[in-house]
Amino acid sequence: MITVIQEAFPEIQERGCVTEINEKHLYIIEDLATKKAKFVSKTAENHLHIENSCSSPYYFIQNDACVMQFEDTKQCDYVIFNNLDFYFCEIKVAIKIKTKSNHKLNAYKQLESTYKFYSDKISFSNIVLHAIIVFPSKKRIVQASSSSKRKAFKVAFNIDLKETNYIHFF
C-alpha cells in the first residue's frame, strides 16, 4: 500500500509527510499550536494509542498539514495504514458536551472529504477502510459512533466509522 500512496502523492517524501513505524506501541498527541502530531512516551499525555501486532511496519501520514495542505475542502488530521487496514483519523479536543457534538458533525465532514480525495487518486481494493474520531481520554475508548452515521458511512463508502482512541493492527 505504501507504494500506491507514494505513486499517488509523490510529494509526501520531500515534504516529510510520511513516517514508517516499526514500534509495537506508539502514542500520539496533537500539538494544538502546530496542529501536527507528536509521538510521545507511554507515560505522557496522549490522544491516540496504536498497537502493532504484525511483524511488518505501518505508516503514519500527517494529512491536513501536508498531503492536503493546498486543498480547500475539509480534511482529517492523519491517515495511518499497513497492507491490510487504512485509517482516516480525526482528533477532536472537546471540553464541553455541546462542543463535542459540534466536533462530531465537523469530523464526519472531514473524514468524508478526505476519503473522497484519496479514493479519487488510489484504489482501496483488498484494503479494510476505517474512519475514526478521537476524543482524548485517559481510558481506552472503543465505542461505535451513532448507529445512523455508522450505517451511512458503511453504505456510502464501505468504511467502518468509530469513536475510539485506539488502533490495533493484527
Image: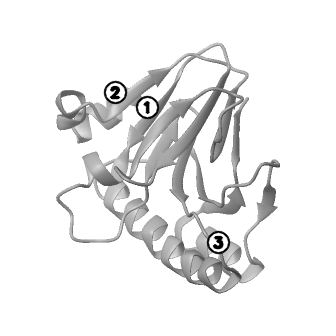
Q: For residue 96, what is the image quadrant?
A: bottom right
> Can you tell which mark lies on residue 95?
3
Instruction: Kindly report the distance in space between the C-alpha atoms of the residues bearing marks 3 and 1.
Output: 36 Å
Position above or below: 80 against 145: above
Local crowd size for mark 2, using a 10 Å CA cut-off: few (<14), some (14–19), many (≥20) = few
Q: Is residue 126 visible?
A: no
Q: Are marks 2 and 1 in contact (CB under 8 Å)?
A: yes
> Can you tell which mark lies on residue 3?
2
Q: Secondary structure at mark 1?
A: loop
Instruction: Kindly report the distance in space between the C-alpha atoms of the residues bearing marks 3 and 2.
Output: 39 Å
Amino acid under disc 2: Thr
Amino acid under disc 3: Ile
Choose mark 3 or mark 2, whichever is in front: 3
Local crowd size for mark 3, using a 10 Å CA cut-off: few (<14), some (14–19), many (≥20) = few
Residue in the picture at 74% in, 54% down: 137
Q: Earlier in the sequence, mark 3 or mark 2?
A: 2
Q: Which residue is mark 1?
A: 1
Q: How is the image coloured?
A: one colour
Q: If the image is split into quadrants, where does the C terminus sit?
A: top right
Q: Secondary structure at mark 3?
A: loop
Side (left or right) of 98 relative to 65: right
Position above or below: 107 against 140: below
Residue in the picture at 65% in, 34% down: 44
Amino acid under disc 1: Met
Q: For residue 155, what is the image quadrant?
A: bottom right
Q: For residue 152, what is the image quadrant?
A: bottom right
Choose mark 3 or mark 1, whichever is in front: 3
